[in-house]
Amino acid sequence: MLKLYSYKTCLVTVLFSLAVLSFPASAMRIMPLGDSITGSPGCWRAYLWQQLGDAGYTDIDFVGSESAPYCGFSHDADNEGHGGFLARDIANDNLLAGWLEASNPELVLMHLGTNDVWNGISTTAILGYYTQLVEDMRANNSSMNILVAQIIPLDPTEYDCSRCYDAVIDLNAALQTWAQGLSTMASPIGIVDAWTGFDVIADTSDGVHPTMAGHEKLGTAWFASVQSVLDGTFVGETVEGSSSSSASSSSTSSSSSSSSSSSSSSTSSSSSSSGGSSSSGGGSGGLGLFALLGLGLLIRRRTG
């Protein structure tokens, strides 16, 4: 009798543990952070959301104080994209801390620096502002996952900025070394190749802002890296976008095109950290229900 009771107690404990473990975890909170390319309309976020859903990743929650749902199909439109903002001003005015406190993300997707380059801020200074933003992220969450984009090409058609294209190349080329100096096991930083394959003529409306086709291309560039975080395989530094094998970006001048090809090979990451498609908690509800039913039957038999 004692052995039977011990056996039932053990079985109840196991079934209860399975029931608890099988309930889906809370959705991964993801903050898209940047300027107008991320903000309104910022439809790369919509395409990324769509691609993640199609791949079975449903336990995700895009977060931020802004919302821009105007992309032609349903998606989670929350974001922290602010038109005209510079990394310098977000860092110096301590804006990110408040945004993080309101949303508490677990993953930040940062495409930022276009306006800094446009305003003539040096690569060294921009990386310094990036570092301040990373410090803010980790102050909010010491285990923050951080993905930083090698930003898309910049060659404004409405304002003369002959240095902008090459300045973006310089910034993108420096990101891998910058990330290696800051990335940690607890809070890894990955570099996403949003540059390669993005055509500044065909994929933007003004040499700055993506067309819808450009946004779709940008969303695809993020996918593999975000997938690696959701799959638990993200280790930082060498994460690259799925567009990295595409042709180099084009420019309006032959010298920029040449620089583009050189930059694409030097800034592309060495390996991709992506795993198979899975959805957090997918298919686990049945196991949890079965375990709870078993627990109920055992309790009734014991007390009856």
Image: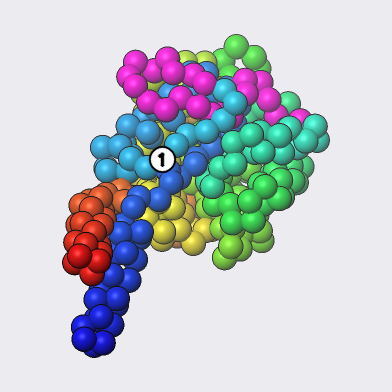
| Quarter assignment of residue 91 | top right
* Residue at screen point 54% across, 47% down: 106
The residue under label 1 is 60
Report the quarter where the C terminus lies: bottom left
Query: Taking 209 as reference, is 282 left or right?
Result: left
| Quarter assignment of residue 177 | bottom right
* Residue at screen point 30% across, 37% down: 53
Residue 91 part of the magenta segment: no
Q: Label 1's element?
A: strand
Residue 16 picture location, percent across and down = 32, 64
Residue 86 part of the magenta segment: yes
Residue 101 picture location, percent across and down = 67, 38
Residue 85 picture location, percent across and down = 68, 25
Given residues 292 and 109, the one toward you in this image is 292
Given residues 265 and 11, the one toward you in this image is 11
**Residue stretch in magenta:** 67-89
Q: In this view, which residue lies farthest toward the right?
A: 92
